Image: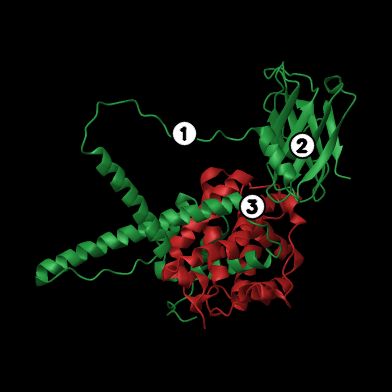
Chain colours: A red, B green
Amino acid sequence: MSPSVLQRIASGDSAAVRECIDQYGPLVWSIARRLSRTPADAEDATQEIFLDIWRSAGRFDAAQGSDKVFIAMIARRRLIDRLRKTSAEPPMDPVEVLDTIVWADPGTASETSIEAEQAARALAELRPEQRQVLELGLLHGLSQSEIATRLSMPLGTVKSFMRRGLIKVREFMNVDAEGVLSEG
Amino acid sequence: MSDTRPQGQPDEAMVDLLVKQVTEGLSPAEQRALDVMDSELASAYLRDLERAAAAVTLAGSTVEEPLPAALSARIEQQAAQHFAVASNVADLTEARSAAAEKTRLHQAAAPGRANRFGGYGWLAAAACLVLAIFSWERAPAPLPPVAEVPPAQPAPPTAAEERAALLAKTDSLKIPLGATKDPAAAGVTGDVVWDPVTQRGFLHFAGLAPNDPAMHQYQIWIFDAGRDKRYPVDGGVFDVPANASEVVIPIRASLMVRKPAAFAVTLEKPGGVVVSGREHVVALGATS
């Protein structure tokens, strides 16, 4: 099995840097656009995320997941950190952006990544309102309180939906299902 | 999973904190509460939840936007700097180790190591060489201090030149702007050039009435076909000087515009507004 682009970066293959930008730039940029307040913020965040990627490439372990999910994790960490530091405001008007989310089809999502397929299958089993909570929180960067306000839903329900939804996805990702709470 | 997982199960309080950390981050108080919990268990489940959140992000990111070319170039340049520095630090560390080893063993210098990032390492080496040459050339003949002359920089392109360059791109849009019945719009002609890929654009006007920035400013609006018509995207504010016969204004879209349907210019209070009352719409242009 040939090494992934992250493994090649970690081993000192300078050509892999350009490949990584070409291969994952659109993904990082798309996530950054959604979870940033302005295009300028998104540009700054994208640069910071790639710097994190260069620094973290040596920690990538293919046995733990795909490089795509590893990069999405790094991107999310950085963007959440930036959101917390800059303001309590949501990054964009989620009502405006909601329509633009197209969930992966569980049948074909494996073309994107195995983890995306697993998540798509898990999401397909959630009730629409549970899926909406995950979408607002994970894809649009709203806090649980903001979701509660927006959906006129008790905060406890939002927390419960978020927790159960993530645990459901986690279970579909073949992580030891005995952990966390057995609800969901 | 190949890692050894800690024994035990997180309680609901820990899970709630971990979910919050993954979705929106923790406040200092919440972080302190998490810090006193079982760190090994928390780390393991945090990793799982981060992976789950990332997987949902991937499942919801089926439509990816292309990375702007200028940003891509900046990232590559930043990578070159990062790896050049990392390579130099690694080489310096190795050189020190080799020197120590040499002293200890009374041997010849240790053999060099292949540069991990060959291309970037050479770039750094070349930069050091250039620096060394210039330093050496200056060293022998101390001269009286002179005022430093900054290196000649090419003049940045004007807005008109940038507009022309954008207009030359095959995928850019050109939309004529029409005047409205507003008094400020009398005799106005103009157009918009917009590049949907880079999200850059320019307004070009002739005949737009000068404004007093202390009283009013013009504001650009972009109507996106994918958004509610009541809330067009703010494209920034601008002024028209008293003696300007023509103006070219860069558009600064505050949000991603997926499918521009129309562009409008309104007259607003200084600094612009979040939602326009549309009392003074001075120009309007639709894509079709």
Q: Residues within 10 Å of mark 2 (few under 14, many from 20)?
A: many
Q: Given the image, on which type of amino acid does mark 3 rest?
A: Arg
Chain on which label 2 sits: B
Q: CA distance from mark 3 to mark 2?
A: 20 Å
In the figure, is residue B51 to the left or right of B246?
left
Disc on res. B221: 2
Where is residue A72, by image quadrant?
A: bottom right
Residue A176 vs residue A54, the one in the foreground: A54
Chain on which label 1 sits: B
- Residue in view at x 71 percent, y 38 percent: B164
- Residue in view at x 39 percent, y 29 percent: B149
Contact, mark 3 vs mark 1 (Cβ under 8 Å): no
Q: Given the image, on which type of amino acid does mark 1 rest?
A: Ala
User: What is the x, y in percent for residue B221?
Assistant: 77, 37
Callout in the foreground (1, 2): 1
Evaluate whether label 3 is on the same chain as label 1.
no
User: What is the x, y in percent for residue A169?
Assistant: 63, 72
Residue A120 vs residue B139, the one in the foreground: B139
Disc on res. A33: 3
Q: Earlier in the sequence, mark 1 or mark 2?
A: 1
- Element carrying mark 3: helix
Disc on res. B152: 1
Q: Is residue A132 visible?
A: yes
Number of numbered discs: 3
Disc on res. A27: none
Residue A77 vs residue B166, the one in the foreground: B166
Callout in the foreground (3, 1): 1
